[in-house]
Image (cartoon, rainbow, N blue to C red):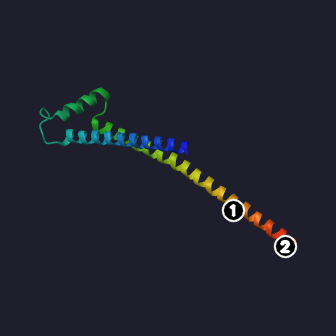
Amino acid sequence: MKNRKKALVVEIILYVVSGGLALWGLVYMILGLLAKYLPILSSKNPLVSFDNTIANLFGLNSLYWGMIIFVIGALVAVLTLLYFAKSADRDFDKKERRKARLLHIEENINKTVETTEENQ
């Protein structure tokens, strides 16, 4: 039970991190689109200077960095979902096998009791 609670905390943290990355990427994409298509002179638009600074520093403008960051956030969410869904399926299968094993043992005990009663 303690491991499940720890896994649940890790799962929630990973989902929050992936959501934060996706939101950050979305904000960068919106800023990049506004910098490119906002009908204001580029000399009066601070988003254009921001976009140019990002492009000079990293080689890509904020629209493309937003896409990259968004995809990373989505990948973290998908990988988290796949990992914890697999462990949940494993736990469910383990419980089902245990239930079937106990039912089989109970049936064998009942058969044994019936045969001993018939023999007496």
State the residue at coordinates (61%, 55%).
95
Q: Amino acid at mark 1?
A: Leu
95 w.r.t. 120: above or below: above
Element type where label 1 sits in the image? helix
Tell me the crowding category of disc 2: few under 14, some 14 to 19, or many 20 or more residues within 10 angstroms, Cα based: few
Element type where label 2 sits in the image? helix
Circle number at residue 95? none
Describe residue 36's horizontal placement relative to residue 83 as left or right. left
Describe residue 7's horizontal placement relative to residue 16 as left or right. right
Residue 108: percent from the left, percent from the top? 76, 63
Spot the residue most to the right.
120
92 w.r.t. 120: above or below: above
Describe residue 94's horizontal placement relative to residue 59 as left or right. right
Spot the residue most to the bottom.
118
The residue closer to the viewer here, 33 or 112, is 112
Residue 56: percent from the left, percent from the top? 27, 27
Q: Amino acid at mark 2?
A: Glu
Residue designated by label 1 = 103
Tell me the crowding category of disc 1: few under 14, some 14 to 19, or many 20 or more residues within 10 angstroms, Cα based: few
Quarter of the picture holding the C terminus: bottom right
Residue designated by label 2 = 118
The answer to which quarter of the image holds residue 107 is bottom right
Spot the residue most to the front.
120
The residue closer to the viewer here, 19 or 74, is 19
Per the model, the C-alpha gap separating discs 1 and 2 is 23 Å
Residue 99: percent from the left, percent from the top? 65, 58
The answer to which quarter of the image holds residue 114 is bottom right
State the residue at coordinates (33%, 41%).
67
